[in-house]
Image (spheres, rainbow, N blue to C red):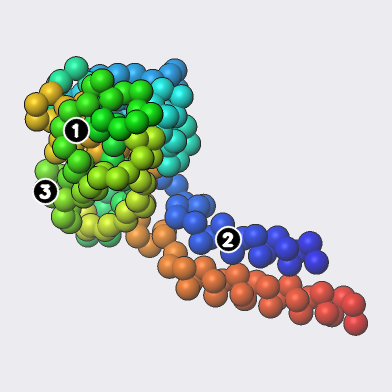
């Protein structure tokens, strides 16, 4: 029975994105350096801040919970530096397909709403947007969230996944805010970034079949022992 329970638990784990497969990106959840919130950061372990600056934030300093771990990024940053961007270069195999996944959210604290302790800094508009680039070329469309009606302490996190085929042995991944006009300090939010070879990411039906087979073997083994 213990084996059956363990196998059932394995099914749940395999259904989660990224479980059991190494992330090719360093500090994809922005947990490092882990020394508290940083407004207007121009350095970030594992990443290069390639435009403006970014805010490394958590629920303690913003009231907004992270999607993964404790920390996450506001890609627009602080001090009116404009739209921020971060990049990281990884080693890839030419012709290999890769899967990039991340949590995308939006900072709704620009709005003058009751209970928002940050409303004295309200500026900008409701739509928060970012682009994802691979080697400088936009991957897919623009990611946008309209924060109209969104609670000031909610990111509205959305799990996104996309794929690309590497054309070089070194591939640069970039996340670029599109909110930076008029000194705004509230932009798109980013967390839980993962990059894996697509062949390492099992499709949910594949994972289910794997565990179904394991359950059948364990069941027959148990029957033989009891018999």
Can you tell which quarter of the image residue 37 is in? top left
Residue 2, which numbered label?
Answer: none
Say if residue 4 shows up in the picture: yes
Horizontal relation, residue 129 to residue 202: left or right: left
Question: Which secondary structure, mark 2?
Answer: helix
Can you tell which quarter of the image residue 192 is in? top left
Name which residue lies at 32% across and 56% down.
161
* Among the two numbered marks 1 and 3 on one chain, the one whose residue lies closer to the N terminus: 1
Question: Which secondary structure, mark 3?
Answer: strand
Name which residue lies at 36% across and 52% down.
159
Label 2 and label 3: CA atoms lie apart by 36 Å
- Is the residue 128 above or below the residue 82 in the image? below
Horizontal relation, residue 119 to residue 183: left or right: right
- Is the residue 35 above or below the residue 179 in the image? above
Q: Residues within 10 Å of mark 1 (few under 14, many from 20)?
A: many
Name which residue lies at 27% across and 57% down.
162
Say if residue 41 shows up in the picture: no
Q: Which residue is mark 3?
A: 137
Q: Position of residue 125 (x, y in %)?
A: 16, 37
Q: Which residue is mark 2?
A: 12
- Mark nearer the viewer, 1 or 3: 1
Label 2 and label 1: CA atoms lie apart by 35 Å
Q: Residues within 10 Å of mark 2 (few under 14, many from 20)?
A: few
Label 1 and label 3: CA atoms lie apart by 14 Å
């Amino acid at each position: 029975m213990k084996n059956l329970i363990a196998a059932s638990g394995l099914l749940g784990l395999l259904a989660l994105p990224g479980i059991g497969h190494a992330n090719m990106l360093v500090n994809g959840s922005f947990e490092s350096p882990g020394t508290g919130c940083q407004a207007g950061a121009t350095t970030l372990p594992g990443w290069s801040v390639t435009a403006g600056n970014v805010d490394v934030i958590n629920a303690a300093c913003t009231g907004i919970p992270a999607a993964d771990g404790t920390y996450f990024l506001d890609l627009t940053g602080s001090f009116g530096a404009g739209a921020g961007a971060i990049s990281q270069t990884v080693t890839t195999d030419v012709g290999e397909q890769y899967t990039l996944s991340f949590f995308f959210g939006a900072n709704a604290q620009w709005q003058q709403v009751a209970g928002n302790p940050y409303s004295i800094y309200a500026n900008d508009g409701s739509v928060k947007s970012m682009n994802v680039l691979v080697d400088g070329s936009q991957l897919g469309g623009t990611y946008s969230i309209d924060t109209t009606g969104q609670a000031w302490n909610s990111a509205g996190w959305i799990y996104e996944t996309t794929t690309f085929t590497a054309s070089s042995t070194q591939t640069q991944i970039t996340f670029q805010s599109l909110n930076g006009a008029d000194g705004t300090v509230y932009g798109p939010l980013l967390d839980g970034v993962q990059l894996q070879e697509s062949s390492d990411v099992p499709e949910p039906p594949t994972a289910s079949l794997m565990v179904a087979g394991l359950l059948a073997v364990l069941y027959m083994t148990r029957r033989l022992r009891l018999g």
